[in-house]
Image (cartoon, rainbow, N blue to C red):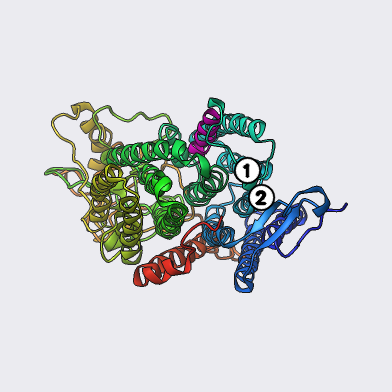
C-alpha cells in the first residue's frame, strides 16, 4: 500500500524549503561584490528579497488554508493497516494554522531585520538566509506534527540552524560563546526529552499523539517519562530552572537571531509542549499540571527579578522574555480544572506578546546602529583650546559626519587611565540603557515606537494589547482555582512595571553630561597635553576661526599623526573642547601673538597636466546605510503597527483565535 500525500496541506513548509534551495543556488552563482563598485541592487539585497518573497508566499498559503476551512490530514497510515480511523502524522487544524501564521508573520520582521544586519557585508548572506529558512520549515511543520517522531525532528530542525546563525558573526568572541552555550543547552535538552519520549513509547507502544493514552494506574515510570519530556521543553522555552542560558545567548547573538529566539523559537517550543500535554498526556493532567504551575511561578519571578538588574537593552529583553514564558505557562498550570480552554489562553497571550516584543527588538536594532553621540565635558577654567585647523590628511581624517560630535579614540596601545570614567574615555556601548537617554529628541518616531511596545509589555494603557493578554491569562487562572498562582502573577506584573517604565522614562530624559577631570584624576594625566603643546604653540599660535572644522565622513579614520587621540569637534562653537592626549592645542594664555605659519597644502599640478578628477562622495557608506536603514524601518512600522491594531481591538483579535485546542 502506498501512503498518499496531500500537497496542499504541506504547501507552506514546501514553499519555504524550495525557497531555501533557491537561495543556496543563487548565492553560489551571484558575482562576488567588488569593492568600490556599488550597484543599486546588491547580491545580499537580492537574496533578502527572495527570502522575503518566500516567507510571504508561505504566509499566503496559510491564509488560503484558513479560508477554505476544514482539517487537512496527510502522511496517514493506510486504511488496511490500522483499526478504526487511520492515525496521521501531519494534521492542519485551527491550532496549526494559528501557530504557523504567527511564526510566518514574525518571520517577515526577522527577515527585514536580517537585511539590515547583513548590509555591512561582514556576515555571509547566502548561509544566513538558508539557515533562517530551514528554521522556518521546522517552525511551520511542528504545530501540525501529530506523532513523536515528527515532533522531535521538527523541533530539532528549528534548533540546529540557530546555532550556526548565532556564530555567523565571525571574529566575535561574545557571539561564539553564545553559540557554544546554546548548542550545549539544546543538546542536553534534546537528550532529556528523547529519553522521556522513549519511556512513553515503551509504555504505550505507539508514537501517534492521539493514541498515546497513559492509564491512571500506570507504573511510576510513566511519571518519570512525563517529567523528562516537560524538562526537555522547559529548556526550549527558557523556563526555570533551565533559563540560565538566555541572557548571554541573547546578548551575544545578532539582534535578528535574538528576536527569532524570543518569538519564533519560543512559539514553537510552546506549540510542542501544548501538543504533548493537552493532546497526548491529557489523562495525566493531575501529574503535570501542579508541576507546570510551580515552574510558571518560578519562571515569571526569576525573569522579572533578573531583569531589574540589567543595564543592557538586549539582556533586559532576554530576561523579560523569560518572565513572559512564565505568564504563557500559567494557564497550563490549571489545565486539570479548566480543560482545553487553558491552551486557548496560552496561545492568545503568545500572539499578543509576539507583536510587542518584535517591535521592541526592531527599535533596539535601530538605536544600536545609531548610538547616542558622546557628550563633551564642560571646559574647566584655564583649559587649553584645541587646534581647530583643517587636517592635512584629506577628507575623513576625523571620520565623523557634520553635526555629530566626534568621539575620542585612543591610539593603538594606549591604555586608559584607571580613574577615567566611560564618558571621559570614549564611546558609550550602544546597547547600554543609558544610550537611550534623550532618544525622544534625537529620533522622536523611534522613541514613541519603543515606548509604546514597552508600555504594551508592561500591560499599561494605552498599550491595551498587553493589558488584555494579561487579563485573559489571569481570568483563566482564577477560573481554574489557581489563587496562589494568580497572586504570584499579580505581584510579578507590578515588578515588571518598574523596569519597563524606567526604560520608557529614559527615552524622554536628557542625556547625562559627561564627567570632567576631578582631583581624583592623576595630575600627570591631566597635564599630559600641556607640556608638548606649550612650546610649539607659544611660537606659532593659531587664532580662532570662529567655527570648528567639519570634515565629511568616509569611514573609520585613525588618529591624526602627532596626536594621541583623534580630534573631537564641537560644531558651531568658537573653540573646540579639550581632548586628552592630543599633540596640538590652542594658544596658551600669556604668550605673544605671532602670525600663523602657512598650512601645508598639496603641490600645484605641473603645467599641461590634466586636472585631477573630483573625489566622489562616500557612496559605499551611503548605500550601506540606506541598505540597512530601509528594511529596519519597515520592520518597525510593521511590528508596531500590528501592536497598535491589537491595542485598538483586542477583543476582536481574541475572537479570531480558537477558544480551545480542538483535540
Main secondary structure along the magenta-highlighted residues: helix
The number of callouts visible is 2
Residue that appears at 45% across and 51% down: 339
215 versus 220 height, above or below: below
Give me the residue at 65% from left, 53% from top.
137
Discs 1, 2 touching: Cβ within 8 Å: yes
* Residue 280, image quadrant: top right
Residue 420 falls left or right of residue 313: left
Q: Is residue 547 left or right of residue 235?
A: left
| Magenta range | 222-236
Within 10 Å of the Cα at label 1, are there few (<14), some (14-19), or many (20+) other Cα atoms? some
The quarter holding residue 201 reads top right
Q: Secondary structure at mark 1?
A: helix
**Which SS class for mark 2?**
helix
Is residue 19 highlighted in magenta?
Answer: no
- Can residue 58 be seen in the rendering of this structure? yes
- Depth check, front residue: 204 or 400: 204
Rendered residue at 27%/45% (across/down)? 483
Q: Give the image location of residue 189, x and y in percent.
A: 55, 32
Mark 1 = which residue?
161
Local packing at callout 2 (Cα closer than 10 Å; few below 14, some 14-19, many 20+) is: many
Sequence-earlier tag: 1 or 2: 2
Residue 171's spot in the image, x, y percent?
55, 36
Relative depth, front residue between 384 and 269: 269
Q: Is residue 619 above or below residue 35?
A: below
Residue under pointer 2: 134
Residue 381 spot, x, y in % from top left:
11, 44
In the foreground, 636 or 658? 658
Amino acid at each position: 500500500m502506498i501512503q498518499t500525500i496531500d500537497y496542499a496541506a504541506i504547501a507552506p513548509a514546501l514553499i519555504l524549503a524550495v525557497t531555501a534551495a533557491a537561495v543556496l543556488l543563487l548565492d553560489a552563482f551571484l558575482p562576488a561584490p567588488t569593492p568600490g563598485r556599488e550597484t543599486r541592487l546588491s547580491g545580499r539585497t537580492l537574496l533578502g528579497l527572495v527570502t522575503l518573497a518566500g516567507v510571504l508566499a508561505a504566509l499566503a498559503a496559510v491564509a488560503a488554508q484558513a479560508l477554505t476551512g476544514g482539517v487537512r490530514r496527510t502522511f496517514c497510515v493506510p486504511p488496511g493497516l490500522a483499526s478504526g480511523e487511520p492515525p496521521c502524522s501531519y494534521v492542519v487544524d485551527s491550532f496549526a494554522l494559528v501557530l504557523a501564521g504567527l511564526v510566518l508573520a514574525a518571520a517577515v520582521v526577522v527577515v527585514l531585520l536580517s537585511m539590515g544586519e547583513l548590509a555591512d557585508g561582514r556576515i555571509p548572506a547566502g548561509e544566513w538566509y538558508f539557515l533562517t529558512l530551514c528554521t522556518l520549515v521546522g517552525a511551520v511543520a511542528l504545530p501540525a506534527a501529530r506523532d513523536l517522531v515528527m515532533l522531535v525532528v521538527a523541533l530539532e530542525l528549528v534548533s540546529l540552524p540557530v546555532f550556526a546563525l548565532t556564530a555567523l558573526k565571525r571574529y566575535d568572541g561574545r557571539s561564539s560563546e553564545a553559540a557554544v552555550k546554546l548548542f550545549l543547552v539544546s543538546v542536553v535538552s534534546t537528550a532529556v526529552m528523547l529519553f522521556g519520549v522513549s519511556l512513553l513509547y515503551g509504555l504505550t507502544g505507539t508514537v501517534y499523539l492521539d493514541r498515546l493514552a497513559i492509564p491512571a494506574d500506570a507504573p511510576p515510570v510513566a511519571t518519570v517519562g512525563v517529567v523528562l519530556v516537560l524538562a526537555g521543553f522547559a529548556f526550549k522555552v527558557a523556563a526555570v530552572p533551565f533559563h540560565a542560558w538566555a541572557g548571554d545567548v541573547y546578548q551575544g547573538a545578532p539582534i535578528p537571531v535574538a528576536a527569532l529566539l524570543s518569538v519564533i523559537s519560543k512559539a514553537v517550543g510552546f506549540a510542542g509542549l501544548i501538543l504533548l500535554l493537552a493532546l497526548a498526556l491529557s489523562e495525566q493532567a493531575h501529574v503535570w499540571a501542579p508541576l507546570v504551575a510551580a515552574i510558571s511561578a518560578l519562571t515569571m519571578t526569576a525573569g522579572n527579578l533578573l531583569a531589574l538588574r540589567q543595564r543592557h537593552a538586549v539582556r533586559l529583553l532576554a530576561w523579560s522574555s523569560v518572565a513572559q514564558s512564565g505568564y504563557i505557562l500559567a494557564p497550563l498550570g490549571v489545565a486539570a480544572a479548566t480543560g482545553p480552554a487553558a491552551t486557548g489562553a496560552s496561545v492568545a497571550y503568545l500572539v499578543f506578546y509576539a507583536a510587542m516584543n518584535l517591535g521592541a527588538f526592531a527599535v533596539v536594532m535601530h538605536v544600536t546602529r545609531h548610538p547616542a553621540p558622546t557628550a563633551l565635558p564642560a571646559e574647566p577654567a584655564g583649559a587649553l583650546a584645541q587646534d581647530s585647523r583643517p587636517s592635512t590628511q584629506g577628507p575623513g581624517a576625523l571620520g565623523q559626519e557634520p553635526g555629530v560630535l566626534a568621539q575620542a579614540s585612543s591610539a593603538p596601545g594606549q591604555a586608559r587611565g584607571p580613574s577615567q570614567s566611560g564618558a571621559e574615555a570614549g564611546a558609550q556601548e550602544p546597547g547600554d540603557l543609558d544610550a537611550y537617554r534623550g532618544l525622544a529628541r534625537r529620533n522622536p518616531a523611534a522613541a514613541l515606537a519603543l515606548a509604546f511596545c514597552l508600555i504594551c509589555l508592561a500591560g499599561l494603557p494605552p498599550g491595551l494589547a498587553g493589558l488584555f493578554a494579561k487579563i485573559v491569562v489571569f481570568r483563566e487562572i482564577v477560573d481554574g482555582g489557581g489563587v496562589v498562582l494568580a497572586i504570584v502573577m499579580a505581584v510579578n506584573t507590578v515588578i515588571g512595571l518598574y523596569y519597563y517604565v524606567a526604560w520608557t522614562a529614559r527615552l524622554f530624559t536628557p542625556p547625562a553630561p559627561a564627567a570632567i577631570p576631578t582631583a581624583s584624576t592623576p595630575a600627570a594625566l591631566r597635564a599630559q597635553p600641556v607640556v608638548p603643546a606649550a612650546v610649539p604653540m607659544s611660537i606659532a599660535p593659531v587664532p580662532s576661526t570662529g567655527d570648528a572644522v567639519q570634515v565629511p565622513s568616509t569611514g573609520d579614520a585613525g588618529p591624526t599623526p602627532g596626536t594621541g587621540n583623534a580630534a573631537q569637534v564641537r560644531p558651531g562653537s568658537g573653540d573646540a573642547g579639550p581632548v586628552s592626549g592630543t599633540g596640538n592645542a590652542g594658544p596658551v594664555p600669556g604668550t605673544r601673538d605671532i602670525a600663523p605659519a602657512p598650512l601645508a597644502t598639496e603641490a600645484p599640478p605641473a603645467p599641461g597636466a590634466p586636472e585631477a578628477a573630483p573625489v566622489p562622495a562616500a557612496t559605499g557608506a551611503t548605500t550601506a546605510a540606506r541598505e540597512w536603514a530601509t528594511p529596519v524601518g519597515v520592520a518597525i512600522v510593521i511590528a508596531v503597527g500590528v501592536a497598535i491594531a491589537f491595542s485598538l481591538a483586542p477583543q476582536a483579535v481574541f475572537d479570531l483565535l480558537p477558544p480551545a485546542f480542538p483535540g
